[in-house]
Image (spheres, helix red, strand yellow):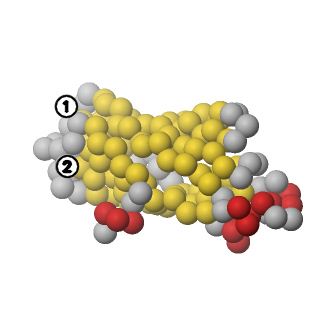
Amino acid sequence: MKELFQHAATTDGITVRVAVNFLPEQSHPEAGKWFWVYHIRIENGSHEEAKLLTRHWRITDARGMVNHVDGEGVVGEQPLLLPGESHDYVSGCPLTTTHGSMEGFYTFAKADGSQMEVRIPFFPLAAPETADRH
């Protein structure tokens, strides 16, 4: 199953895996809109529970424009991961260019109340060349 995920990063025993796919049916190149869907799996390989509190994304388009996105949880959830558990979710990212990238971090709370930042690996967003044609 790990082959599904092209990108991964581990911080303090918590691994974030990412699979990303371009969605031509949600993209409208003639209108300058391209769309990707990404599947994230967060695996708690540590020896303590961890609750996902917030997310921070850095989204960069082909023009170098950077958009920072902060929010509570992921897709409306703040999962509590016990040791050995994982949490999957799917979300999407629109851009006004044919390629870009995403990266960021989650803030987790440990059982003792302390917080830690868990890295979300850098991953490219790239539309196939055929998506440019009008």
Residue that badge 2 annotates: 45
Residue 74, image x, y percentages: 47, 50
Give the residue displayed 56% in from the left and 36% down from the top: 58
Give the residue displayed 54% in from the left and 43% down from the top: 102
Q: Quadrant of the N terminus?
A: bottom left
Q: Quadrant of residue 35?
A: bottom right
Give the residue displayed 82% in from the left and 54% down from the top: 32
Query: Left of 132 or right of it: where is 40?
Result: left
Residue that badge 1 annotates: 112
Give the residue displayed 86% in from the left and 61% down from the top: 30
Which element is circle 1 on? Answer: loop
Residue 107, image x, y percentages: 38, 35
Measured Cα–Cα span from mark 2 to mark 1: 17 Å
> Farthest residue in the top direction?
114
Residue 51 visible somewhere in the drawing: no
* Vertical position of residue 24 compared to residue 116: above or below: below
